[in-house]
Amino acid sequence: MDKATLDKLIERCTRRDEKAFAEILDQYKHLIAATIQKRIWNLDDVQDQVQIACVKIWRSICDFDPEKGKFSTWICTIANNAATDFLRHRARRDKLLVDYGDQISAFCERHANPILNADETYILESLLEKLCAGKKSDGTRQIFSLLRTGETDRSIAEKLNMPTGTVKAVIRRGKKWLRTVAMQKGLIMAA
């Protein structure tokens, strides 16, 4: 693709012309994939990061400045950054798996009332936020807060003036959801 054609396509992309962007991607998709594949070997992960890089390119194409460098270099930089972000995220996830995986697994598997340490609390707080987000006031947050302090399901039911069966059902659903999310994030292994 000659420079004049590329410049026209970039200009059209700045006006959010998806067809122009598709033409650019047809020209550069192999370069994007090759750049990412130099750092990430798993093909599924490469494909995911190519998609992420393409979205980043689309969102920031207005920022491309031909005075600062070639378009292909700019695209490679974005692709390389996507790979770097992925590798950093994976390293953090792997560290969590090593450091906290057993604790989260134990939390999810325990039928007895867990008393969490500070590390477990930090990780589970974000999961509990998601668990409770958008829920009607079924007491999920209160139930899990009391459960984490070592309260029994019966004492939680008494304190919240709820039937014990309801408390047990909320705990069971919450633990199931936490286990599913922890497995999806790679924090625990499927049984």
Image: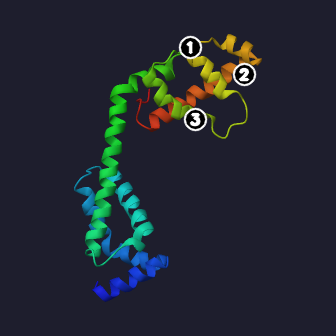
Marker count (numbered): 3
> Could you say where residue 136 lies in the image, as x and y percent from the top left?
72, 36
> Could you say where residue 87 lies in the image, as x and y percent from the top left?
30, 47
Extreme residue in the bottom direction: 4
Q: Which residue shows up at 34% across the image and 50% down it?
A: 85
- Which image quadrant is residue 161 in? top right
- Which image quadrant is residue 10 in? bottom left
Q: Which amino acid type corresponds to the residue marked 1 in the rendered image?
A: Asn
**Left or right, residue 32 beside residue 176:** left
Q: Which residue shows up at 40% across the image and 58% down it?
A: 52
**Left or right, residue 39 beside residue 7:** left
Which residue corresponds to mark 2?
Answer: 166
- Which image quadrant is residue 31 in? bottom left
Label 3: element kind: helix
Check the picture and name the quadrant holding the C terminus: top left
Q: Which residue shows up at 30% across the image and 54% down it?
A: 83
Label 2: element kind: helix
Q: Nearer the viewer, residue 102 or 76?
A: 76
Q: Nearer the viewer, residue 191 or 159?
A: 159
What mark, if any, has residue 113 been given in the picture? 1
Q: CA distance from mark 3 to mark 1?
A: 19 Å
Q: Which amino acid type corresponds to the residue marked 2 in the rendered image?
A: Thr
Q: Which amino acid type corresponds to the residue marked 3 in the rendered image?
A: Glu
Q: CA distance from mark 2 to mark 3?
A: 20 Å
The 10 Å Cα crowd at callout 1, few under 14, some 14 to 19, many 20 or more, is some
What mark, if any, has residue 129 been given in the picture? 3
